[in-house]
Amino acid sequence: MNTKQKTLLVITGGSAVMLGILVFLIIPFAGHVSANSAKLEELKGQIAQMAADEKSIQYFQNIIAGKSKDMGRISEIFIDRTSPIAFIEFLEDLGGDTLEVVPGVVEKEDNLPWDFLEFRITMHGSYKDLFLFLEGLEHSPYLVEVKTMSLAQELDGNLRLSLVIQVFVSTP
């Protein structure tokens, strides 16, 4: 074998080895790099979405923290369904000795989002006393709805106020 043939054989063998390396190592490696880079881009998108979600959650938590006092006050407008003692005491303090309160049962109407407790109230007194009672009931910290109201004059000159009110109760 002469030098020319040896050179040709070395070049051909080297080319075959290089081609084999290219086909069996570099091309599959490039394919894996491409797949991993697509996964990396997807993960970057997920991280960006998570960062935006975290920022939104933090913003919402800041709003809630600022409104926590109001949220506590909202729960106070409902009375306790099992023992409305605080509300009855409020009515007695407001109306004094001339007040009669008869609580009803907890009811639910389909068009209302909350259950309510119905009270029948009768009060005797002067116009001023009745007006002050109604004003106090209107400005009470409870969520109250007046269903019926009647006013009559008694023989002694005083007035008799009869009310049926609904007071919304907290859900268990």
Image (cartoon, rainbow, N blue to C red):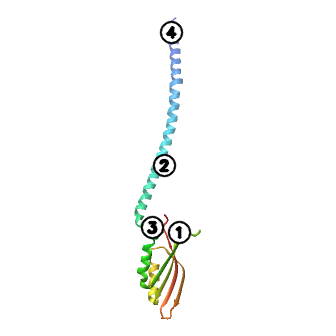
* Along the line of sight, the residue nearer the viewer: 42 or 109: 109
Label placed on residue 75: 3
Judged by depth in the image, the label closer to the viewer, 2 or 3, is 3
Q: CA distance from mark 1 to mark 4?
A: 101 Å
Could you tell me residue 143's position as x and y percent?
48, 73
* Along the line of sight, the residue nearer the viewer: 39 or 102: 102
Give the residue pinned by disc 2. 49
Label placed on residue 124: none
Give the residue pinned by disc 4. 6
Label 2–label 3 contact, CB within 8 A: no
Could you tell me residue 69's position as x and y percent?
40, 66
Q: CA distance from mark 2 to mark 1?
A: 41 Å
Q: At x 49% / y 83%, what residue is drawn?
A: 122
Q: Secondary structure at mark 1?
A: loop
Callout 1: few (<14), some (14-19), or many (20+) C-alpha neighbours within 10 Å?
A: some
- In the current view of this chain or complex, which residue is farthest to the bottom? 156
First in residue order: circle 3 vs circle 1: 3
**In the rendered structure, which amino acid carries the disc numbered 1?**
Asp
First in residue order: circle 1 vs circle 4: 4
Callout 3: few (<14), some (14-19), or many (20+) C-alpha neighbours within 10 Å?
A: few
Q: Is residue 55 left or right of residue 5?
A: left
Residue 8 lies, with reference to residue 68, above or below; the image says: above
Callout 2: few (<14), some (14-19), or many (20+) C-alpha neighbours within 10 Å?
A: few
